[in-house]
């Protein structure tokens, strides 16, 4: 994030767990945040 390769809201999407079951449970509960996509922005020409 310090070098701006990753936005804070994207870092929050990282899922971790102590077991495979914990990670799968986290994936089931996951709700992706809505963020601006740089690639979808209209060109400014």
Image (cartoon, rainbow, N blue to C red):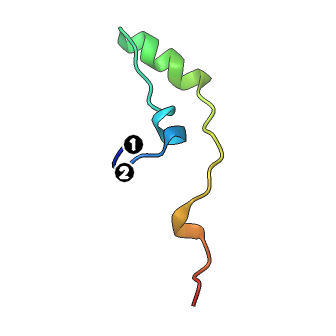
Please name the residue shown 52% across and 68% down the image.
39
| Residue located beneath label 2 in the image | 5
In the image, taking residue 25 as reference, residue 14 lies left or right, namely left
**Does residue 24 lie above or below 42 as drawn?**
above
Q: Which label sits on residue 19?
A: none
**Does residue 42 lie above or below 31 as drawn?**
below
| Image coordinates for residue 45, horizontal then vertical, percent | 57, 91
Please name the residue shown 41% across and 46% down the image.
6
Quadrant of residue 9 within the rendered picture? top right
How far, Cα to Cα, is label 2 from label 1? 6 Å
| Residue located beneath label 1 in the image | 1
**Label 2 Cα crowd, 10 Å radius (few <14 / some 14-19 / many 20+):** few
Q: Are marks 2 and 1 in contact (CB under 8 Å)?
A: yes
**Label 1 Cα crowd, 10 Å radius (few <14 / some 14-19 / many 20+):** few
The total of numbered circles placed on residues is: 2
Please name the residue shown 43% across and 18% down the image.
23
| Image coordinates for residue 19, horizontal then vertical, percent | 36, 9
Mark 1: secondary structure: loop
In the image, taking residue 33 as reference, residue 1 lies left or right, namely left
| Image coordinates for residue 8, horizontal then vertical, percent | 50, 39
Mark 2: secondary structure: loop
Along the line of sight, the residue nearer the viewer: 40 or 25: 40
| Image coordinates for residue 22, horizontal then vertical, percent | 45, 11
Quadrant of residue 17 within the rendered picture? top left
The quadrant in which the N terminus is found is top left
Residue sticking out furthest to the bottom: 45
Along the line of sight, the residue nearer the viewer: 32 or 10: 10
């Amino acid at each position: 994030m310090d070098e701006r390769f990753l936005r804070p809201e994207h870092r929050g999407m990282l899922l971790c767990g102590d077991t495979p079951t914990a990670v799968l449970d986290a994936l089931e509960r996951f709700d992706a945040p809505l963020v601006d996509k740089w690639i979808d922005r209209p060109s400014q020409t």
